[in-house]
Amino acid sequence: MERQPRRRRRPALSCLECRRRKIKCDRNDPCAHCVSSKSQCTFKVYSREPITQQHRQQPGQDDRPGENLSSPAVSPSFSAQHSHTNTHRSITENAHHLSGPLPTATAAISATIPTPGGQNGTPNTLGRSNIRPPEAAQDAEPNIQDLIRRVEKLEETSSSEHIRGLSDTNQEIFSRQLGVQSSQIMLNKTRVLGWSLRMGITQEFNPAYICYCAAIGMVASDPNTELGALHGQIGNLLQKCKNVARAIKAGRPSRGLWSPDLNLTPPSREIADVMVDLYFQSFESTHRILHVPTFRSDYQRYWDSPESVTTGLRLKILLVIGIGLSLSEHGHIDAGFRKTVLQWIYAAQMWLSGPIEKDRLNITGLQIHCLTILARQIFSVGGDLVWMSMGSLLHSAMQMALHRDPKYLPTMSVIQAELRRRLWATILEMVLQSSLDTAMPPRISFDDFDTEAPSNNNDDELDESTTAPNPHPKGTFTSTSMQLLLLDSLSTRLRLLRLLNGLHSELSYPDVLALSAEITDAFRKCSNFLKENEKSGVRAFHRNLFDFLIRRVLIPLHSPFASKAPTNPLFCYSQKVSLDSAMAMISPEPDKGFCRLLSIGGGMFREGIRYASSVVSFELLSQVEARRLEGTLHRNLQCIEFLKKTMNEMISMSEERVRQGETNVKSHMFLCMIKAQVEAIEAGIPCELKIAQSAVDSLELCYELISAQASRVSSPHYNDAGLTPADLDSFSFNMDMDFFWSDAVSS
């Protein structure tokens, strides 16, 4: 029986790059995705002619041999599926090979066929691949066409068998495209739920979540039972902690309309010098905001004549001193000093928020803005709202044309041009980090600026008399090297955030693996560079901060898939990457300054801890539950014991954060509840009572700590506007689970 001609599948209208990345193409030429990623945008044109299996057309017929080159084996979707199916067992070692389709024999053979340009002998325009081999090629090599068709058939059969071997769930993994647009929007109080909160909404945390809901009255609980009585205690303790936290927050300058006398007096010169040195030895390495010799000169001028300096210079100096305090090892200094630093931060924010003046739309104004946002995150002054403030900073910088390279602007000195490039790179990094914390799209793309990277020079090599920067080779370590290292991965991280947080973005698991491989490769190269330059001044703090800024982006990238690893081994690589990144943040290289920063830091530092805590908690629960089901709870305990040790370290860190000024007691309570749940599973007893009792113990401890905080906070002095502490109730935090759960989830 003669076989029926096989017709080609529906022609693909997307460009080849979008098909390879499994993202939606807008079909423009070039398309938006290729423009943003700076990739070559090419389209493949298909014929509607059927292809026979055994009959080869004669040279005189109107055939299109070029059509035969597009077998299913070389289509992006089939290649990606075939690749991942065969390599999922060794995905950890070969993740960087999964970023695109595998080369096929068809493509190799077709490369030998002459392929001129368009039909009229002219090159194709707009990057399209509308290729028709000449008739002579068909006459001279008819056997090649037959060979191509045979190889196509074999590859198609092989690929189809592997795809059919996958379960329905796994087939969906490689065909679906996840995006924010199709997901449910959840609010935490009045804000979109961030990644650290979304990551805690998994079934493993249900027992702790149910206990919390019963404590606040969202789930019915019988008060006459032992468990119901514990739920009542938890609810009462939460309310008491909330009242104390409200009193603490009422004393902050931002909570009223009073006009306090802000103390803008610096400490003694001796203490100030120590704090300034700490700042330049730490944060200025990655956040290039100041030119060190220029600042030192202004700093000396300030001490020589404090009354003659401008408000902008005064605030800049005070912010540098305050940021340095966060790393100080002198406990007796920061007992009352920290309160003064908070006043400096509020004063700088008020100065920035005041009526726009020309003296603020300059380099000094941008420097103060960057320092203020950095200080807000370090000292938890609205650190979780930094993304909004970054919009103002970014717009100010673009208004001053920092998004344009100085070579396109009127002639300026070399030092001014380099300072503008450094500031712009710092702003880009801060925009990226704030976007990651809030699960909001970044406000900038690479199409919006053409500013070049700063030159690889030390600060003492640049001054007003410099006519040419004469940069060092990239392999030479300078005071700008760490910023340049961050810039190397900025494009990948920005592309990742657009896929994670963009409204119309689409993300598939092959995209996740490809982006993860790019970031991991960049991180390894940078880590090796820092290790090789330890003698040049690279300290443990620098390595920890660099590690923190780069690797924490991998957790929200992999978390949607890592949570499915216990039931789907295809995602074990995501689980491993998430855990490795979390451990790197929780257990950094020993450094007193960085550990202190994690104890007091808000903003991106608190979010990083939340990322890590959710990952470690999930890993511990899933492993213990899996061992219980397998009956191996008491065998090979090394891994479980290591995770338990890490959990205890996180509980200790959370306790220290409350002692240092944190008012969110639910973080500590949640971790204690997870620990109790694990202990109950290991003991083979119901976990409800043990979880509730651990929550009571945690809240009793936290209540003592925040009560001690409140005793050190002075009552605010209100002005004649009639504002009272009772009017501040709208500013208090609600009874939602701030650590992982939101009102939307619990409704």
Image (cartoon, rainbow, N blue to C red):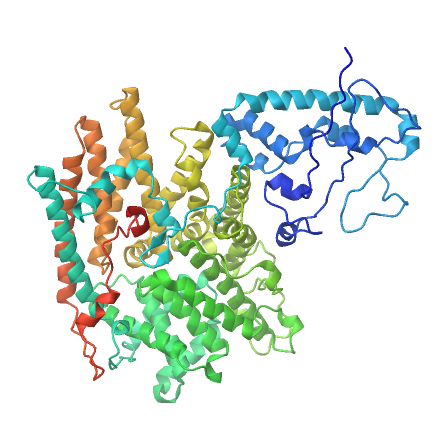
Q: Is residue 532 above or below residue 644?
A: below
The residue under the point 25% across, 49% down is: 667
Give the residue at the far left of this rendering: 224
Snapshot quadrant of residue 387: bottom left
Snapshot quadrant of residue 254: bottom left
Residue 537 visible within the image: no
Q: How many marks are shown on the rendered structure?
A: 0
The residue under the point 45% across, 52% down is: 534
The residue under the point 52% across, 43% down is: 507
x and y percent of residue 602 in the render?
A: 32, 59
* Left or right of 491 in this view: 274: left
* Left or right of 336 in this view: 405: right
x and y percent of residue 218 in the render?
A: 21, 47
x and y percent of residue 238 in the render?
A: 16, 53
Residue 299 visible within the image: yes
* Left or right of 416 in this view: 377: left
Give the residue at the far top of this rendering: 1
Q: Is residue 88 above or below residue 421?
A: above
Quadrant where the N terminus is found in the figure? top right
